[in-house]
Image (spheres, rainbow, N blue to C red):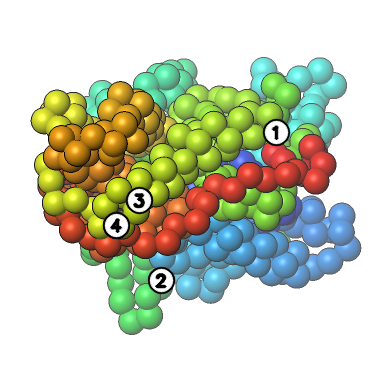
Amino acid sequence: MGYYVTTPIYYVNGEPHLGHVYTTVAADVLARHMRQRGEDVFFLTGTDEHGEPVAQAAEREGVAPRELADRNAERFKQVAERVNATNDFFIRTSDPEHAAVVTEVVARLKRDGHVYAGTYEGWYCPRCADFKTDAELIEGDRCPVHLIELEREKEDNWFFRLSAFQEPLERLYADRPDWVLPGNRYNEALSFIQGGLRDFSLSRARISWGVPVPWDPEQVVYVWVDALLNYYSALSYAREGEDLRDEFWPATVHLIAKDILKFHAVFWPAILMAAELELPERVFIHGYLLMDDHKMSKSLGNVLDPFKVMDLYGTDALRYYLLREVAFGQDGSISPEGFENRYNTELANEYGNLASRSLAMIERYRDGVVPEARAPAALVAELEGMAAAVCSRLDRVEVSGALDDVWQTVRRLNRFVAEETPWKLAKDPEQADRLDSVLYALAEGLRVVSVLLHPYLPASAERLLAALGREDRSIEGARFGSGAGGARIGELGQLFPKVEAPEPSAAP
Ligand code: ME8
């Protein structure tokens, strides 16, 4: 079985912001890391283009939905490229191949008795594309997320018999406690299920921007059903002439934020059960990036342009900051000060300077050749198991936990330099062996942390590994002390140069 990781498909009713980048970068770290482990990886991201969220935004802008979708899908594609995401495919739900799978699955649900005609009466938020209960609304009949006034709706449409899956879902949660992570989100989803499940509308009669219901073309498939199926449909046409579902279905992990927990942790498994398809192994729910204590979102207007940040500081710095500053799985605030602080102290000093100092000492004391020596045994013992720890963290999607583990080693290596004072050893010919050992250990330490950091800082880690004269990027080779000496050191330059921000608002 391959390793299949997904991000949500993002709505094209607005432009990409840092919140979208966050999930995409986290998924990319998992994909890159698993490739380093020799896994067959498929990494999917893309755009959600149907339904009211997009139709209404297009109307506001006075353009056809398809035009808005084409324009913004392009922006999302560009942002994925710009952050160095290695997605294997970019799905757009307006792809005809996707629509064909939606049609086929929905028809099967109808055939097998999971769908019936009914009348929906209640509240609907067109921005969430979600039905709201009275209890969820805030004062003035407004959506709790978008704060817009909602209208009461009455519409004849097709219902999915979600209530029939109450018991199967409870069983799923009992049998597979790791299926939703972290644990607090598992509990949240489970208590939603235990609160009693109501059937939901599988179709919408009011709009035409969507996939037509196969037996009732006056209606379109509810955008959430359409959207969730992307994870499955993409595999059927991502590679021409191949059906990747055999190798990659079920998905290994869906990454999402908590705003769409109900859809992924309740609706999605029920739809899959009804369609007799296998369930994904895991849904991991990360928290919100906050700015000034509020969720960053386009409707609240407190968004940052990821392009600006990357132009100034580089892609790696942004990737690093997002996964370092906020514990993956929890909410966390980001700020320009926090960014500059991490950039200067951690990236520039702790990693960048460690690298340039170490290389300079190898150059000066050993003519630019890494000594063929052994690292001090105590350090070898201390760093043993680091790669295994990172692997097991990432198996559990602890993306910032794994980064923290590696960073502890970066700091350990800095302390090692301070303890060993190679510049003093260099003055004493009797200490030549010790100096060999210290310089080898530094090159070796930098090699191993750079292999492990590679998924997070692909460009910088690559540069450093190249300067160290190393080819192997595999996790298997990332054992401290296993690398041979003798390599000639190359040019490195500054990994994270000092940046003079032209104005404070240009930083995140
Ligand atoms: O919900 N902090 O699309 P969307 C962290 N199309 N993550 C954030 C974030 C923030 N402040 N803001 C956005 C949709 N995200 C649907 C999904 S999937 C079948 C359909 C990220 O454009 C996070 O991953 O509103 C969140 O779940 C997603 O963007 C929502 O993107």
Q: Secondary structure at mark 4?
A: loop
Extreme bottom residue here? 241
Q: Amino acid at mark 3?
A: Arg
- Mark 1 vs ligand 1: CB below 8 Å: no
Asked if labels 2 and 1 touch by Cβ distance under 8 angstroms, the answer is: no
Q: Looking at the image, which residue is at 41% across and 43% down? A: 357
| Label 4 or label 2, whichever comes before in sequence order | 2
- Can you identify the residue that label 4 sits on? 367
- Can you identify the residue that label 2 sits on? 238
Query: What is the C-alpha distance between the residues marked 4 and 3?
Result: 6 Å
Q: Secondary structure at mark 2?
A: loop
Q: Position of residue 496 (x, y in %)?
A: 55, 47
Tell me the crowding category of disc 1: few under 14, some 14 to 19, or many 20 or more residues within 10 angstroms, Cα based: some
Query: What is the C-alpha distance between the residues marked 4 and 1?
Result: 41 Å
Q: Amino acid at mark 1?
A: Pro
- Can you identify the residue that label 3 sits on? 364
Between residue 114 and residue 307, name the one nearer to us. Answer: 307
- Can you identify the residue that label 1 sits on? 336
Between residue 189 and residue 342, name the one nearer to us. Answer: 342
- Please indicate whether residue 149 sits to the left or right of residue 230 in the image: right
